[in-house]
Amino acid sequence: MTYNPDLLDRTKRHPEKQKNPDRPSGPKPDWIRVKAPPPNGVYQETHDIVKKLHLTTVCEEAGCPNIGECWQKRHATFMIMGEICTRACAFCNVATGKPDALNDMEPTKVAVAVQKMGLKHVVVTSVDRDDLDDGGAAHFVKTISEIRRLTPDTTIEILTPDFKNKAGATATVAKAKPDVFNHNLETIPRLYPTVRPGARYFTSLRLLQEVKEVDPTIFTKSGIMVGLGETKEEVGQVMDDLRSADVDFITIGQYLQPTPKHAAIDRYVHPDEFAEYERMARAKGFLMVSSSPLTRSSHHAGEDFARLKAAREAKQAAQ
């Protein structure tokens, strides 16, 4: 899959959002500002590897604010199954439309990129592929297999879609034994109809629960955005729901509006409130918590995985 320059045009990238009124997000506070990516050095090397192999990254497609930091460290989150999503979530910058056929060579190309970058921990995510019978589960399995073939010591974290109405898809991927199985709830249940209309809260929650049923040793992870109009009590309930599904790791970050046509920002959440969410989550029993304005699912994923393993080992030793 090669990058489509037409998708730089938001009217083509998000045709379903063009009738929405503009929703100004207001000036960003100082704590949400990031440095622009450096034009050369390791950042450029990472860029060149990705482009030479014709791979897609969520770093670029989702407009991640941490791309400069991550690519400068030769970290990238690969987005498989193309760059066009079959859904149109109100918060997401990934293009919506009819995807192309799967590229059978993509799993191998991802593995080659992992090898060239020397990654000890890799994160692989994807667009939603509701057009496929298995939602892309087999493609995830092939990608995991190819990474293990070329770089057997690399730990693998996957961030999957919800595989809604795709019977057996979650179990298929879980049986490939990724080290971390991540699926984001994204927001509180009340906001699903407007923020994540193509998904169902309890479908996502059930997916995370099913992973543990297939293999209790797989670390499970999920994340939400704040600043969309949720209350502190509703965030606490999401934490309780995730713990009821035995989820190990929660991430909480600030929602940032990709364009004025996307879901409006209700407010910029202060860092002190993120610290409070972290205290709440740890008190509820999560092994690992990442809660800050710039927290994203794959940000510092390698370092967080090491902490996650250490936390489990400490818990087991204490029992």
Image (tube, rainbow, N blue to C red):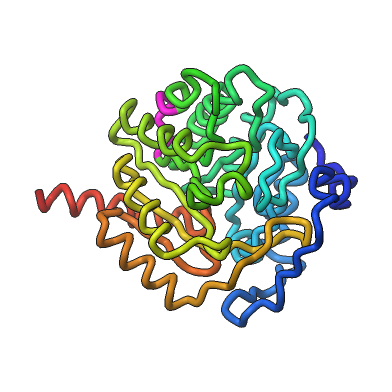
- Residue range in magenta is 174-179
Please name whichever residue, 205 or 9, is drawn nearer the observer in this view of the structure.
205
Which residue is most to the left? 319
Which residue is most to the bottom? 30
Relative image position of residue 83 (x, y in whole percent): 74, 39
Question: Is most of the magenta stretch helix, strand or loop?
Answer: loop
Give the residue drawn at x 64%, y 63%.
256
Give the residue drawn at x 64%, y 76%.
33
Q: Quadrant of residue 99?
A: top right
Depicted 146 relative to depicted 269: above or below: above
Asked whether 164 falls inside the magenta stretch, the response is no
For residue 20, say whether it is visible. Answer: yes
Depicted 205 relative to depicted 194: above or below: above
Depicted 20 relative to depicted 79: above or below: below
Q: Pick the quarter of the image with the N terminus.
A: top right
For residue 146, say whether it is visible. Answer: no
Relative image position of residue 54 (x, y in whole percent): 76, 39
**How many numbered tags mark residues here?**
0
Side (left or right) of 35 relative to 252: right
Side (left or right) of 104 relative to 291: right
Please name whichever residue, 217 or 266, is drawn nearer the observer in this view of the structure.
266
Relative image position of residue 218 (x, y in whole percent): 34, 36
Give the residue drawn at x 43%, y 42%.
155
Give the residue drawn at x 35%, y 46%.
241
Relative image position of residue 126 (x, y in whole percent): 62, 38
Q: Quadrant of residue 246?
A: top left
Depicted 175 relative to depicted 260: above or below: above
